[in-house]
Image (tube, rainbow, N blue to C red):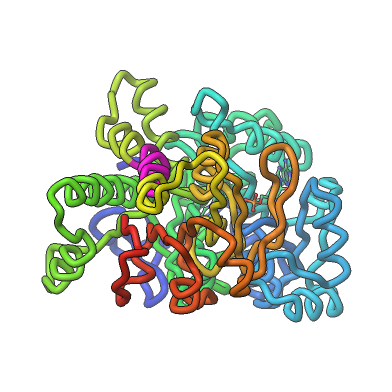
Amino acid sequence: MKSTLNWRFDATLVNVAGPMPQPRRARKPRPAQALEQRLENHTARLAVIGLGYVGLPLAVEMAQAGFEVVGIDIDEKRVKLLNQGQSYIQDVPTTDVAELVREKRFRATTDFSSLRECDTVNICVPTPLSKQRDPDVSYIVAAATEVARYLHKGQLVILESTTYPGTTDELVLPMLSESGLEVGKDFFLAFSPERVDPGNPTYNTRNIPKVVGGVTPACTSAAVRLYRQRLEHVVAVSSPQVAEMVKLLENTFRSVNIGLVNELALMCARLKIDVWEVIRAAATKPFGFMPFYPGPGLGGHCIPIDPFYLSWKARASGFEARFIELAGHVNGHMPDHVVDLVLEALNRQGKSVRGSKVLVLGVAYKADIDDVRESPSLDIMEKLREKGARIEYSDPHVASIAFAGGRLNSVPLTAARVKAFDCLVVATAHKAFDYSELLQWSKAIVDTRNALAEKRSPKIVRL
Ligand SMILES: NC(=O)c1ccc[n+]([C@@H]2O[C@H](COP(=O)([O-])OP(=O)(O)OC[C@H]3O[C@@H](n4cnc5c(N)ncnc54)[C@H](O)[C@@H]3O)[C@@H](O)[C@H]2O)c1
């Protein structure tokens, strides 16, 4: 364990760094005291870099707590929309943004020099994979370069982008230290993973516990102080590396369990056992089991990507992360399996895939949201197109998508339109779909999500 934490325990702060030390009043560096005072009386000015699914909800929460918040993004269109009081993120109501802009508690800009006036900076930029499937931390480097340029005494910098353990200490800290300022004394640096779950009606930025690990105890203390002004639970850990690893454990846990259940689904298909019934029954066990469900493949900006940040880091130190690679292999094969199911559905009608009309239902990567990043639907559509199928899609949350070098618009689900397709594929189980009608109108329907669990029909081909 790298450091001992020294603040008092209270209902909103959980210290998981080890046995709780006796409350001991360590003398804090003067810049830390001044910052904490401004955080407590809400006179601190806050900056959020990267106003996407993670950054915008955080900026709005903090502005609603009474802080003056500036959001910085390189996307001019997004900045313009926000300053007009409009949200482009489903979970952030436009009315909230409009009110905060009107009251001058939130503004957006592309100008990083605003950081000069800010007491805190939260970095929420993307962390994708490169073409070689290695971490692409160029967005973090770009943001940290700007932060370093305007770093000043008493400033708190928190990285929130999901990344490999060591990024804060090994990549960001040296960039900020070039200023000559000393971490933990002159400025404060921490990592705090974002756990937001877009479209989740129960858990949001405010009530999801926030894990925080600072480079020094003073850094952790300052970051905890910031989040406690608005968030309901803050969990302090002993270092940025632990906080970085927490996020990767969470998403690797999901990826591996989904991989396991996808393999089980393929196995059950071979053994002619209904995998959905097996999971339903197993989930009645009140302890020691948590249900995961098979599907057409992984999607979104987290689960298909984050575990590879961890395996890359492990590989760099000579460790092979076998579970991660295996889960990636099984999950990555699922779109091919769905294509096989479509071939079976067409075959039952005496049709070949070439020239057949296939309608994919749902292109968002999960139900009831509008995010298509890494969506397996796109993979399935592309694979079917390569085999000569004529592909269209319908998604109430996604009006149009880039596809095959052009654009496709969502097809309205009328009886006449649906009846014209040889096969439907339920790729995302949006609540807005009327599955009874779709079954009635379809010639064949491949169900990758068990959305037609209650239905019995020879037209259904289940995953
Ligand atoms: N989306 C999720 O559900 C989710 C959940 C937990 C964690 N995360 C992690 O949070 C991070 C951000 O993800 P997101 O989903 O919010 O991404 P996003 O693509 O929705 O938003 C990122 C924003 O950052 C902006 N940006 C890019 N480079 C920039 C730069 N140099 N300076 C300023 N702005 C810049 C982009 O224009 C964009 O608006 C990623 O590391 C992601 O893995 C995402």
Residue 293 position within the rendered picture, expressed as x and y whole percent measured from the top left: 30, 59
Q: Nearer the viewer, residue 150 or 270?
A: 270
The picture quadrant where one finds residue 371 is bottom right
- Specify the quadrant of the image occupied by residue 96: bottom right
Q: Residue at x 46, y 73 (%)?
A: 203
Classify 418 as above or below 363: below
The magenta stretch spans which residues? 331-341
Residue lying at 53% horizontally and 73% vertically, measured from the top left: 206
Q: Mostly what secondary structure, the magenta segment?
A: helix
Front-most of residues 393 and 345: 345
> Residue 425 colored magenta?
no
> Can you see residue 360?
yes
Where does the image place residue 59, in percent across and percent down from the top left? 68, 65
Quarter occupied by the N terminus:
top left
- Can I make out residue 242 in this image? no
> Residue 125, percent across and down?
64, 46
